[in-house]
Image (cartoon, grey):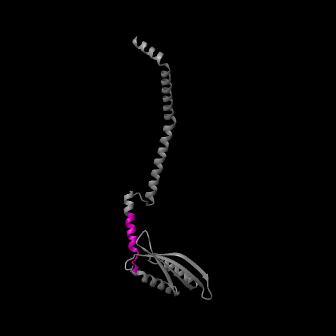
């Protein structure tokens, strides 16, 4: 009997609060049902799609020999590659060897370089010296093609920055070259 009296008093004095509590409870149950019916399956489907695509990307990287290494290992490999690269760049003492190689390559193509102008600059981000070389050669098209090909095949790090062709007289074509290469400062008087 006491239970009925207690609920009766509760209903009498807190009717509005109990109605709101009941409404909130029903809303909670409706939201839970909506989540279970609509949102949870979509989230599960998208998560499954994401995991499948991630697996496909990993498989593609493995098939293409891509890097699946952790960042630390990738960093170490990059540092080793950079070290090997810097070791292939000759000391400044080899600058005359570069000029000699250019003259030999032009001679093999039956071309004559009479004057080479150059400028140098210290790179800000490293200790390397950047050299720009400019010169002209004249000859027929086959000779120039052979010369350019031999420059590209050189074991030295030579970048052809600019190339210009001009018609010449009976001698054929005039080729203007702007090359760029790098040296370590070893043996250079500063």
Above or below: residue 75 compared with residue 116: above
Boundaries of the magenta span? 77-92
Q: Quadrant of the N terminus?
A: top left
For the residue pair 127 and 67, the one nearer the viewer reads as: 127
Instruction: Name the spot of residue 171 as percent of width and height, x first.
Output: 60, 88
Instruction: Name the spot of residue 42 as percent of width and height, x first.
Output: 51, 40
Q: Would residue 49 be found to the left or right of residue 170 on screen?
A: left
Magenta-span inclusion, residue 83: yes
Question: Magenta stretch mostly in which secondary structure?
Answer: helix
Q: As drawn, which residue projects farthest toward the front? A: 190
Q: Would residue 179 be found to the left or right of residue 72 on screen?
A: right
For the residue pair 155 and 121, the one nearer the viewer reads as: 121
- Residue at 38% x, 70% y is 84
- Residue at 61% x, 81% y is 166
For the residue pair 58 and 157, the one nearer the viewer reads as: 157
- Count every numbered label the image shows and give the total: 0
Above or below: residue 151 compared with residue 80: below
Instruction: Name the spot of residue 161 as percent of width and height, x first.
Output: 52, 75
| Residue 185, image quadrant | bottom left
Magenta-span inclusion, residue 28: no
């Amino acid at each position: 009997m006491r239970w009925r009296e207690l609920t009766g008093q509760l209903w009498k004095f807190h009717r509005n609060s109990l109605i709101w509590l009941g409404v909130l409870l029903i809303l909670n149950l409706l939201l839970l049902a909506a989540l279970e019916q609509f949102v949870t399956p979509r989230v599960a489907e998208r998560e499954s799609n994401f995991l499948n695509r991630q697996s496909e990307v990993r498989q593609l990287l493995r098939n293409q020999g891509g890097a699946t290494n952790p960042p630390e290992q990738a960093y170490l490999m990059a540092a080793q590659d950079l070290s090997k690269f810097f070791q292939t760049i000759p000391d400044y003492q080899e600058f005359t060897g570069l000029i000699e190689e250019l003259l030999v390559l032009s001679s093999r193509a039956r071309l004559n370089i009479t004057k080479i102008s150059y400028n140098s600059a210290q790179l800000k981000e490293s200790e390397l010296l950047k050299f720009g070389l400019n010169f002209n050669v004249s000859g027929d098209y086959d000779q120039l093609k052979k010369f350019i090909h031999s420059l590209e095949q050189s074991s030295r790090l030579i970048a052809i920055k600019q190339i210009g062709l001009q018609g010449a007289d009976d001698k054929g074509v005039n080729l203007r070259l702007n090359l760029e290469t790098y040296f370590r400062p070893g043996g250079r008087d500063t």
